[in-house]
C-alpha cells in the first residue's frame, strides 16, 4: 500500500485538474517553478452586466477578449492598427511601418525570412505565454539565448583583448578558471580556515577543481577543452588528439573590461546562473512572434475586433463606459458596462481619457523606454558556415549595437536575417534620428569588425524605433523604485469601471507574459465585481 | 602619461570626465541633430500628440535648471542622457535649442550642467 508521497499526490492532481492545477500544486508544495500565473482565472457564472469594451488588440487585449468571451461576456475590441498583436509583430516581405517623423519602410526580405522586431523570445518559465501557444497549437522552436561559440567584442578596455572578437566560452572558462584557482590555492594556504572546517575545506577545493577545470596536482588553471582547441581532435594520428588552446591571461581579461558593468546584456549571461529573465532555454514561435496573437485572434468570434479604429475619448458614468472612436474618418461610439484599457500609458496619457486626477498623476510616473532594433538580411549564413555559430548573441560594449543576434531558425539554409542591433534609451534616440539606410550602415560598420563577410553579404534591412511608433511611443513601461511603490499600485486598481492592463502593469515588464498575466488578473477582478453587481 | 591621467581622475569628486582646456568646442547643430532630432524633429516642432515642440516652448526658454535636469534625468518617454553625454555636449545641444527656430534665450554653459549633474548615474536598460 503506497503512502501518499508528494509525487503521487502531484500525479493525481495532474490527472484530475490538468496542467494548470498541477503547476499550482507544485508551487504550493515548494517546488518553486515560478510565481507566475500558470492559467487564466476561472470565470464562473455569467453576470447581468456583461458588456465589456476592450481597448487594444495586443496580447493583453486578446487574452482578455478570449477569456471573457468564453465566460459569456459580450465583448468588443477596438484596435487602432489593421492587424492584431500590438508590439508582437513580425516584419516579413511587404510589412510596412512608418515612424513618426520618418519615412515609410516596407520590408523587402526574401519570402520566408523575417525579423521579430518586437518581442522575440519566451523564457521557459513564462507559463502564461506558453499556455496560449499550447492551447492554440502554435508550434515552437528553441531560441538559443546563450552560445559559448559566439563572439564578444569589447572596445572600451585596454590590453590584448580589447577591440578583438573573443569567443564567449573562452572568456567564461578563463575568468571562472582563474577565480577557482585563486580560491582553491587560498583555501589550501589556510586563508579560509576561520570559515571552513578541514573537511569542508577539502570539499570546497574538490568543488573548485571540478568547477574551474583545475589541475588536481597543483590547482592551476591552464585551460579547458570546453573553451575550444587550437587544433580540434579528429581521426588517426594527425590531427588525432588535436592541440589544446591556451588561456588568455587574467590581466588581459580584466583590462579588456569584457563583461564589466555598463554593458547592457552580457552580465545576465556571465553570472553563476543565467539571470531569471535571460534563461538559456527559451522558445520562439515557428515563423514569427505574430503567430501567437494571430492564433488567439482566430479563436475570437468574427468581427469582434474592430480594426483601424482609433480611440479618441473615454468617459464613464457610474453605470457605463462610453468610448468615442474614429474609423476611416467616421466617428463611432460604443457603450459598455466595463472597459479594459490596454493602451500603453505613453499613448493613453495623450488621449482624452477622463480618468481621475489620481490616475492621471500616476500615469505620469511611468516612463517609456526608447528602443531600436534592426533586421539585416544576409545572402549567406557566414556566422554558421565560417564561424560555427548557430544562434545566440554577440555582445558588445557599444551602446548603439549592444547585441548582434544570430537567427534560431533556418539552420544551414542559404540566407538568414540577423538582428543587427538592439539599443535603448539615449542610444536608441541617437540611432533613430538616422535614415533607414544610415541605421543599416551603423550596424554593418560594427558587424564587419567581427565578421569579415558582414558587409559583402548584406542585402536589405528593416529597422524600428519603438519610441517613434505612433501607437506605442516606447518599447515598454519603466517604473522607478519610487514610482513602483507610489504610482503603480494606483493604476493596478480600477478607475471606476475602467481596468488598465498590459505589460506596464506587471513585474514582467517588456515581456509578453506581463501582458497576459496583467490581463488575467484584471479580468478575474472585473468578474468578481460583476458577479456582485 | 598614464600615471598623470590616473592622478587627474583621483582629484575629481565624481565620475564625470574632465573637459580638457584643449578640447574642441562642440558643434551645437550636430549635438541636437544626433541626440534630440529623432523625436523633437530638425525643425524643433516636435510631433503633435507624441513629442513636444521645442520652438517657442516656455519650458525650454525659461530658467536653465529645468531643461538641464530634464536632459540629465529624462522625463516620460524621454531618456536620460546623463550617462552618455558629457557636460559640454548637453550644453551645446541646449544652447542650440534655445537659439533656433525663433527661440532667443541665453546659452547654456558646461558648468551649468556640471552643477546639476551630481554623482548618481541612471541604470542602464537591459533587453527583453
Image (spheres, rainbow, N blue to C red):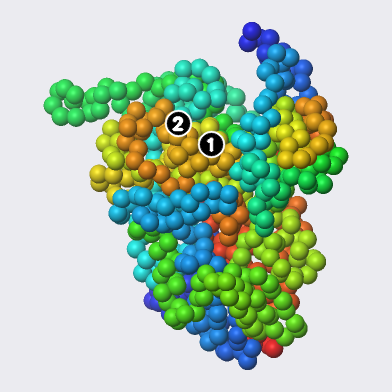
Provide the chain ID for the residue under circle 2: A
The answer to whether residue B22 is visible is yes
The answer to whether residue A220 is visible is no
Task: Please tell me in which quadrant of the rendered image residue A363 appears.
Answer: bottom right
Q: Is residue B57 left or right of residue A191?
A: right
- Name the residue nearer the viewer: A108 or A263: A108
Mark 1 closeness class: few <14, some 14–19, many ≥20 residues within 10 Å: many
Residue at position x 49%, y 79% in the image: A304
Residue at position x 86%, y 39% in the image: B63
Residue at position x 19%, y 24% in the image: A239
- Name the residue nearer the viewer: A68 or A320: A320
> Residue A281: x, y in percent?
42, 51
Q: Secondary structure at mark 1?
A: loop
Residue A247 vertical placement versus A48 (above, below): above
Q: Is residue A407 left or right of residue A465?
A: left
Q: Quadrant of the N terminus of chain A?
A: bottom left
Residue bearing mark 1: A400
Q: Residue furthest top?
A: B1
Q: Is residue A137 left or right of residue A33?
A: left
Distance (Cα) linking label 1 and label 2: 9 Å
Q: Secondary structure at mark 2?
A: helix
Residue bearing mark 2: A446
Residue at position x 68%, y 88% in the image: A532
Q: Is residue A395 left or right of residue A366?
A: left
The reply to whether the C-beta atoms of the residues labelled 1 and 2 are less than 8 Å apart is yes
Q: Residue furthest bottom?
A: A48
Q: Quadrant of the C terminus of chain A?
A: bottom right
Q: Earlier in the sequence, mark 1 or mark 2?
A: 1
Amino acid at each position: 500500500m503506497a503512502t501518499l508521497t508528494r509525487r503521487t499526490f502531484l500525479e493525481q492532481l495532474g490527472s484530475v485538474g490538468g496542467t494548470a492545477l498541477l503547476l499550482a500544486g507544485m508551487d504550493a508544495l515548494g517546488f518553486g517553478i515560478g510565481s507566475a500565473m500558470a492559467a487564466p482565472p476561472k470565470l464562473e457564472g455569467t453576470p447581468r452586466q456583461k458588456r465589456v469594451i476592450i481597448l487594444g488588440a495586443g496580447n493583453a487585449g486578446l487574452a482578455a477578449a478570449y477569456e471573457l468571451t468564453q465566460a459569456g461576456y459580450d465583448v468588443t475590441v477596438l484596435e487602432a492598427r489593421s492587424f492584431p498583436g500590438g508590439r508582437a509583430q513580425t516584419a516579413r516581405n511587404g510589412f510596412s511601418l512608418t515612424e513618426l517623423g520618418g519615412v515609410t519602410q516596407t520590408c523587402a526580405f526574401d519570402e520566408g525570412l523575417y525579423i521579430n522586431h518586437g518581442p522575440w523570445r519566451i523564457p521557459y518559465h513564462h507559463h502564461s505565454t506558453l499556455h496560449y501557444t499550447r492551447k492554440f497549437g502554435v508550434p515552437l522552436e528553441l531560441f538559443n539565448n546563450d552560445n559559448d561559440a559566439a563572439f564578444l567584442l569589447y572596445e572600451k578596455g585596454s590590453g590584448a583583448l580589447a577591440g578583438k572578437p573573443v569567443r564567449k566560452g573562452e572568456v567564461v572558462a578563463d575568468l571562472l578558471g582563474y577565480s577557482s584557482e585563486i580560491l582553491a590555492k587560498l583555501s589550501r594556504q589556510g586563508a579560509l580556515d576561520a570559515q571552513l572546517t578541514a573537511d569542508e575545506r577539502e570539499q570546497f577545493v574538490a568543488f573548485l577543481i571540478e568547477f574551474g577545470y583545475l589541475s588536481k596536482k597543483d590547482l592551476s588553471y591552464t585551460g579547458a577543452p570546453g573553451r575550444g582547441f587550437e587544433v580540434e581532435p579528429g581521426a588517426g594520428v594527425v590531427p588525432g588528439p588535436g592541440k589544446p588552446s591556451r588561456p588568455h591571461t587574467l590581466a588581459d581579461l580584466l583590462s579588456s573590461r569584457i563583461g564589466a558593468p555598463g554593458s547592457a546584456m552580457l552580465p545576465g549571461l556571465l553570472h553563476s546562473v543565467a539571470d531569471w529573465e535571460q534563461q538559456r532555454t527559451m522558445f520562439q514561435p515557428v515563423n514569427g512572434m505574430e503567430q501567437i496573437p494571430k492564433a488567439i485572434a482566430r479563436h475570437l468570434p468574427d468581427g469582434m475586433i474592430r480594426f483601424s479604429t482609433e480611440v479618441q475619448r473615454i468617459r464613464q458614468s457610474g453605470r457605463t463606459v462610453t468610448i468615442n472612436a474614429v474609423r476611416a474618418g467616421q466617428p463611432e461610439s460604443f457603450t459598455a458596462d466595463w472597459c479594459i484599457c490596454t493602451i500603453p500609458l505613453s499613448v493613453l496619457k495623450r488621449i482624452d481619457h477622463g480618468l481621475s486626477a489620481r490616475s492621471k498623476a500616476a500615469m505620469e510616473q511611468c516612463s517609456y523606454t526608447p528602443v531600436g532594433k534592426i533586421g539585416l538580411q544576409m545572402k549567406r549564413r557566414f556566422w554558421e558556415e565560417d564561424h560555427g555559430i548557430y544562434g545566440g548573441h554577440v555582445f558588445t560594449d557599444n551602446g548603439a549595437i549592444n547585441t548582434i543576434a544570430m537567427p534560431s531558425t533556418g539552420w544551414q539554409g542559404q540566407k538568414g536575417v540577423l538582428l543587427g542591433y538592439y539599443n535603448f534609451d539615449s542610444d536608441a534616440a541617437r540611432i533613430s534620428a538616422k535614415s533607414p539606410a544610415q541605421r543599416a550602415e551603423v550596424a554593418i560598420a560594427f558587424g564587419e569588425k567581427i565578421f569579415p563577410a558582414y558587409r559583402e553579404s548584406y542585402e536589405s534591412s528593416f529597422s524600428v524605433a519603438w519610441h517613434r511608433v505612433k501607437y506605442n511611443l516606447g518599447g515598454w513601461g519603466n517604473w522607478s523604485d519610487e514610482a513602483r511603490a507610489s504610482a503603480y499600485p494606483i493604476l493596478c486598481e480600477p478607475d471606476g469601471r475602467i481596468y488598465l492592463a498590459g505589460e506596464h502593469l506587471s513585474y514582467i515588464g517588456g515581456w509578453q507574459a506581463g501582458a497576459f498575466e496583467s490581463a488575467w488578473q484584471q479580468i478575474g477582478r472585473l468578474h468578481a465585481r460583476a458577479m456582485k453587481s | 602619461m598614464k600615471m598623470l591621467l590616473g592622478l587627474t581622475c583621483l582629484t575629481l569628486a565624481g565620475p564625470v570626465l574632465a573637459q580638457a582646456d584643449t578640447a574642441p568646442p562642440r558643434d551645437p547643430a550636430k549635438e541636437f541633430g544626433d541626440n534630440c532630432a529623432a523625436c523633437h524633429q530638425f525643425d524643433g516642432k516636435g510631433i503633435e500628440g507624441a513629442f513636444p515642440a521645442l520652438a517657442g516652448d516656455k519650458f525650454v526658454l525659461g530658467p536653465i535648471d529645468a531643461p538641464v535636469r530634464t536632459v540629465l534625468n529624462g522625463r516620460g518617454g524621454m531618456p536620460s542622457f546623463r550617462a552618455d553625454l558629457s557636460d559640454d555636449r548637453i550644453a551645446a545641444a541646449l544652447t542650440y535649442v534655445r537659439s533656433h527656430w525663433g527661440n532667443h534665450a541665453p546659452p547654456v554653459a558646461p558648468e551649468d550642467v556640471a552643477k546639476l549633474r551630481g554623482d548618481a548615474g541612471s541604470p542602464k536598460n537591459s533587453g527583453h
